[in-house]
C-alpha cells in the first residue's frame, strides 16, 4: 500500500504522465471540460473534495512553473484567491477572462474535476522540471482545509 500522497490510482497515473510545460486544469464541478479530454473526476458530492484540497494534494506530487486563474476570482472567491497568492511564491501567473481561460484550457492534457461549487474555483497549471526554485516555499499543508 502507498504510504502517503495521492491514493487515487487514476489521478496519480495521469499526473505521472505530465512532462515539462504540459498544462493541466483543476476545475470546479461546473467547468465546461472540452469533449474528449482526459478527465479524472474526483468529485464525490457537492463541495467534496474542495478545489483547495485537490490543489494541495496535487502540489504535493507535482512541480509547477506557472498558473492561470479567472480575472474575477479575487472578487467572487477572495478566500481562494488570497490563499493562492500566499501559496505560489516563484511561479509566473496570469489572470484572464473566463472565455480566455476556457479557450486556453483546450491545450490542457488533463482535467481534474472536483466537487467544488464556489465560483471561479479553477486553475490551469503548467508543469515544470525539478528546478529547486519552483519546488521550494510552496505551502501546501492540509492543516488549513481539514
Image (cartoon, helix red, strand yellow):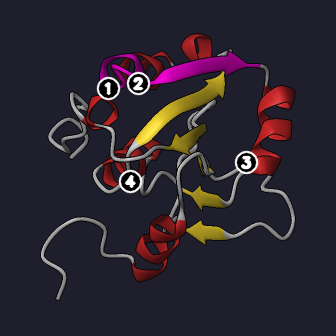
User: Which residue bears the numbered disc 3?
Assistant: 31
User: Which residue bears the numbered disc 2?
Assistant: 84
Mark 3 or mark 1, earlier in chain: 3
Q: Camera-side residue: 106 or 64? A: 64
Residue 30 part of the magenta-drawn span: no
Mark 2 or mark 3, earlier in chain: 3
Q: Where in the figure is residue 96, as x and y percent of width and height?
A: 73, 19
Mark 2 or mark 4, earlier in chain: 4
The quadrant in which residue 68 appears is: top right
Q: Camera-side residue: 35 or 108? A: 108
The quadrant in which residue 52 appears is: top left
Q: Camera-side residue: 50 or 5? A: 5
Proximity of marks 4 and 1: CB atoms separated by less than 8 Å: no
Label 2 and label 3: CA atoms lie apart by 19 Å
Label 2 and label 4: CA atoms lie apart by 14 Å
User: Which residue bears the numbered disc 1?
Assistant: 87
User: Which residue bears the numbered disc 4?
Assistant: 58
Q: Where in the figure is residue 26, as x and y percent of width and height?
A: 56, 49
Packing grade of label 3 (10 A; few <14, some 14-19, many >=20) is some
Mark 4 or mark 1, earlier in chain: 4
Q: Which residues make up the magenta segment?
A: 84-96
Proximity of marks 4 and 3: CB atoms separated by less than 8 Å: no
At 51% from the left and 21% from the top, the residue drawn is: 92
The quadrant in which residue 7 appears is: bottom left
Packing grade of label 1 (10 A; few <14, some 14-19, many >=20) is some
The numbered mark at residue 112 is none
Query: In this figure, what is the number of numbered marks?
Result: 4
Q: Taking 122 as reference, is 54 left or right?
A: left
Q: Secondary structure at mark 3?
A: loop
At 76% from the left and 44% from the top, the residue drawn is: 105
Amino acid at each position: 500500500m502507498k504510504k502517503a500522497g495521492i491514493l487515487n490510482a487514476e489521478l496519480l497515473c495521469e499526473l505521472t504522465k505530465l512532462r515539462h510545460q504540459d498544462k493541466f486544469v483543476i476545475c470546479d464541478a461546473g467547468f465546461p471540460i472540452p469533449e474528449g479530454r482526459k478527465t479524472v473526476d474526483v468529485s464525490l458530492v457537492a463541495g467534496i473534495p474542495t478545489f483547495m484540497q485537490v490543489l494541495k494534494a496535487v502540489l504535493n506530487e507535482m512541480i509547477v512553473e506557472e498558473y492561470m486563474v479567472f480575472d474575477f476570482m479575487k472578487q467572487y472567491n477572495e478566500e481562494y484567491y488570497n490563499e493562492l497568492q500566499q501559496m505560489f511564491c516563484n511561479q509566473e501567473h496570469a489572470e484572464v477572462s473566463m472565455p480566455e481561460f476556457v479557450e486556453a484550457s483546450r491545450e490542457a492534457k488533463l482535467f481534474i474535476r472536483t466537487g467544488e461549487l464556489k465560483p471561479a474555483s479553477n486553475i490551469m497549471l503548467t508543469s515544470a522540471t525539478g528546478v529547486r526554485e519552483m519546488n521550494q516555499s510552496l505551502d501546501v499543508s492540509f492543516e488549513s482545509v481539514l
